[in-house]
Every structure is written in structure tokens, then in C-alpha cells.
Image (cartoon, grey):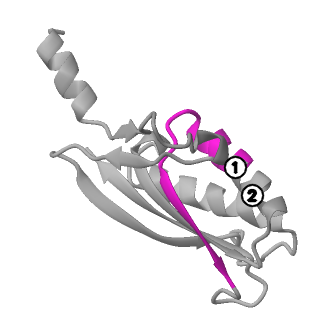
Amino acid sequence: MTSQDKAQAISARPVIVNPCHLHDPTPNGYSTAVITPASGRLTFISGQGGQDQTGALSPDFGEQVKQAYANLAAVIDALGAHPDQVVKLTVLVVDHDMSKLGVLTETVSRMFGAGLPAQTLVPVQKLAIDPMLFEVEAVVCLD
């Protein structure tokens, strides 16, 4: 593979940008910006909640987060994509407080490793289904 081929292969993947003169967001489970390649197609994944295959929701916030990210991973896999192709997450958290941030950061770091997507956390009063405590939607850059 020539250096030009390598550069094209690298540019075919999203590039994470965390400017050094800004606060480092990675300990909080996100990146400041992600550049999508010109050849990439964007796919928008609807919000995934913590329902299991039967539609049941655990009353536990951590379990809902874990299941929601498992659901998100299943959609990403169904697209033929990988977590490193996720460029943006939006998370909705009912009655957000700092204790929930640790659960979120740990789960995102486990799924995405060092390739953290851009992310916005939105505290909300409630979601579509009363016992739902968490929802995550994603933008994926397909090659």
C-alpha cells in the first residue's frame, strides 16, 4: 500500500478533533468535533431506549443505559458499520444529576474506546414512555 493509499484509507474514516487549547472532553466520554470523510454517507439512528427484546424496561438507570447501548450496537451492526463510524451521539437523561454522568461515561468509553464521538447530553423531565430514564440517538458515517 502506497502512502497515498494509506492517506486515502485514513481519510475514509471519521477524524476526531480535540483542540489542545480547549478543555479535554475525553474523560467525560466525548470528543469536541468529528470530521466525516467526503465520501461518507450519513445515517441517522433513532433514539434507542433501554427496552429489552420483549419491550420490558428495568427500573434501574444503569441497566437501562447498558441495554440502550446494546440496542444501539445492534443497529450499528445491522448497518454493517462499527462503533468507530459513529460521529455524533445525543443522549437524553431523565432527572439528570452528576451520579448518572459516571454511568454514562463508563458505558460510552467501553463501547467506543479512544474513538469517542461528539456528544450532547440533554437533561429532560420525561421521555416517551413513563418508566424510560434514558435514550441515545446516533449519527453514523457509512463508507
Distance between the alpha carbons at the discs numbered 1 and 2? 6 Å
Asked if 23 appears above or below 49 in the picture, the reply is: above
What amino acid is labelled 2 in the image? Leu
Mark 2 and mark 1 in contact (Cβ < 8 Å)? yes
- The image shows residue 96 at horizontal and vertical percentages of 75, 72
- The image shows residue 44 at horizontal and vertical percentages of 37, 66
The residue at 17%/26% (across/down) is 8
Asked if 106 appears above or below 140 in the picture, the reply is: above
- Label 1: few (<14), some or many (≥20) within 10 Å? some
Left or right: where 48 falls relative to 43: right
- The image shows residue 88 at horizontal and vertical percentages of 44, 57
> Is residue 16 found inside the magenta-colored segment of the image?
no
The residue at 39%/48% (across/down) is 33
What amino acid is labelled 1 in the image? Thr
Question: Which quadrant of the structure image shows residue 122?
Answer: bottom right
The residue at 22%/48% (across/down) is 40
Left or right: where 75 falls relative to 108: left
Which region is colored magenta?
Answer: 106-124
- The image shows residue 56 at horizontal and vertical percentages of 77, 77
Q: Mark 1 points at which residue?
A: 105
Asked if 78 appears above or below 2 in the picture, the reply is: below
